[in-house]
Image (spheres, rainbow, N blue to C red):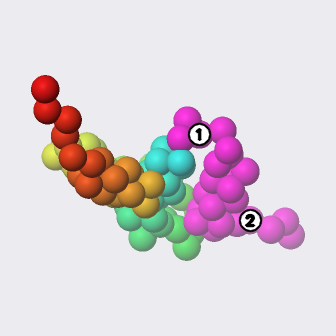
Amino acid sequence: MAFIPTFEEAATSVHAEQEKTFTSEDHACNWIQTLETYVFPVVGKKTVDKIDSADVLLAIGPISKHRRDNQSWQCPSEVSKRRQLQSVPLLRA
């Protein structure tokens, strides 16, 4: 019988393989953080062959609400950049 990975195993593997192709570190962080927050709790332990459309809808529903609420992730590099910007005094003319 062939090995069938869980969704979490498959997604983590794909993320690791594709991480260098993301447009930025923040994008890579947001991608996996979204899965960790919303998707893994719903289908992370299921093997990929057992995930159905109801599972997908249950997992992505909260993501849509998050987007509507216009919240943003606080990835380490984003937080660091914001702190650096906040510590730079504004130049005044």
- The residue mark sitting in front, 1 or 2, is 1
Where disc 2 sits, the SS reads loop
Give the residue at mark 1: 22
- Closer to the chain start, of discs 1 and 2, is 2
- On the image, the x and y values in percent for residue 59 come to 38, 57
Q: Distance between the residues labelled 1 and 2?
A: 26 Å
Q: Dot 2, crowdedness within 10 Å: few (<14), some or many (≥20)?
A: few
At label 1, the amino acid type is Phe
Magenta-colored segment: predominant secondary structure:
helix
Q: Does the magenta stretch include residue 11?
A: yes
Find residue 39 and report its image quarter. Answer: bottom left
Residue reaching furthest to the right? 1
Q: Which mark is residue 4?
A: 2
- On the image, the x and y values in percent for residue 57 come to 36, 50
Looking at the image, residue 44 sits to the left or right of residue 49; the answer is left
Instruction: Name the residue rendered at 45%, 65% in the picture.
Output: 36
In terms of depth relative to the viewer, which is nearer, 77 or 70?
77
Where disc 1 sits, the SS reads loop
Q: Is residue 31 magenta?
A: no
Query: Taking the image as drawn, is residue 49 in sight?
Result: no
Segment tinted magenta in the rendering = 1-24
Instruction: Name the residue rendered at 64%, 48% in the picture.
Output: 19
At label 2, the amino acid type is Ile
